[in-house]
Amino acid sequence: MLTVLRSSWALLLGMLLLMLGNGMQGTLLGIRGGIEGFTTSQMSYVMAAYFLGFLFGSQMTPNMIRRVGHVRVFAALASMISAVLVLYAVAPHWMAWAALRVVIGFSFSGVYITAESWLNNASSNENRGQALSLYMMMQMTGIIAAQGFLNLGDPSGYILFVIPSILVSISFTPILLSVTQAPAFETTKPLSFIRLYRASPLGCVGMFLLGGVFSAQFGMSAVWGTQVGLSVREISIFVAAIYIGGLVLQYPIGWASDRLGRRMLVLGLSALGAAATLTAAIFDLGFPALLVIAALMGGVSNPLYSLLVAYTNDYLDRSDMASASAGLIFINGLGAITGPLITGKMMDWMGPNGFFLFMGLLFGALALYGGWRITRRSTLQAGQTGSFAKLTPGASAIAVEAAIEASSDGTAVAEADKQGG
């Protein structure tokens, strides 16, 4: 662990500061949008725009890096993020925000790809797992801590937009001044979607549905909180609870995944997520109960992401795993674009509880599909599966591939079922 910190402290510190900025902007826009009088539908377009930009960034950044190098791409995109965070307050119009969200989503996607390739290059086979764990802990810690920063100023003013801009500007200073050499960059062509679906229908369908869940959580939580009349403090605590749940439950569920059937865990966790969110949609709950629901939402969805990646890889040759990770991330991104849009329509139709109903329906659909898939393919035994790699939904294909490499020796693959339907 100390070796990892010595070699990668600048990158880890920079990522922590970046996530403070990213964690603030999503929640802050939801609150400020309510102050500006934007409708739920308008805010849903604003929130969906981030994921559209993120998807574009994941496809275009590799070519940018090959053309001009890591350092220039990282510096340019981080500078763009810093500028956009200030421009939100300068141009408080939902269409301007939507355009800016495309830009900032694109930029964050590129920054993640650049940073994760740096981290992967700086790590050895022996400490890569520890490095990725620290990196993901910095990401989650940054987002959680960012919610506290929302209480440092008035969301109707400028200061809360200036703070994340400053944090992002500071974040790339230690990274760009680090002596760590920029790595050679290689990309992997995604596995064809037909081959990927044939290898794991549950992995593909599940990643699409989870994309909608994640984007609703990340993009529409503050919009929902504003609609129901929560204070800035209560909204920040609610959003933080989602990520705390994801951070805490990732490890016990990962432990269970390597010892129990993955599909039964997918089914069980999805059913739990559906029960929790539908309860919130149907009943008028107090704030403490809503915090429990938030923690369950995050605690279910984050491990489900890692479970579906691990489950898909159980049916692939080692040589196809990197290609599959890129394809799964793309599918997840497509689902993420639709999440805020549908959530916004449902909130217009039935009020704020449409936020929870949308996620409940997606969790329920995943549970039903997972149950049906159990009847279509025999379950692998624990000894036939690879190891569970702890991942976050924002991780690039580089981080996913490195996490799989670090957590598995690649020998546990079910030969008889690799091409099963």
Image (cartoon, grey):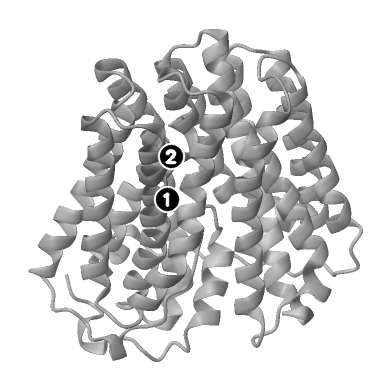
Provide the secondary structure element on which disc 1 rests. helix
Within-10-Å neighbours for mark 1: few <14, some 14–19, many 20+: many
Which of the pair 185/359 is nearer the observer? 359
Q: Residue at x 42, y 50 (%)?
A: 298
Report the side of 141 relative to 279 (left or right).
right
Q: Which residue is rendered at x = 22% and y = 62% of the image?
A: 268
When the figure is inspected, residue 205 is found, relative to residue 102, above or below; the finding is below
Q: CA distance from mark 2 to mark 1?
A: 8 Å
Which residue in the protein does label 2 denote?
217
Query: Given the current orientation, which residue lies at the most extreme top position?
Result: 37
Measured along the vertical axis of the image, is residue 396 above or below residue 239? below
Would you place residue 222 above or below residue 111 in this image? above
Which of discs 2 and 1 lies nearer the camera? The answer is 1
Residue type highlighted by circle 1: Gly
Pointer 2 and pointer 1: residues touching (CB < 8 Å)? yes
Q: Position of residue 361 (x, y in %)?
A: 22, 40
Is tag 2's residue or tag 1's residue first in the polypeptide sequence? 2
Residue 230 in the image: state x and y as whole percent.
48, 23
The numbered mark at residue 43 is none
Query: Which residue bears the numbered disc 1?
Result: 298
Percent x, y for residue 48? 46, 31
* The C terminus: image quadrant: bottom left
Residue nearest the viewer, comparing 260 with 202: 260
Q: How many neighbours does mark 2 have within 10 angstroms: few (below 14), some (14-19), or many (20 or more)?
A: many
| Quadrant where the N terminus is found in the figure | bottom right
Q: Residue at x 35, y 32 (%)?
A: 286
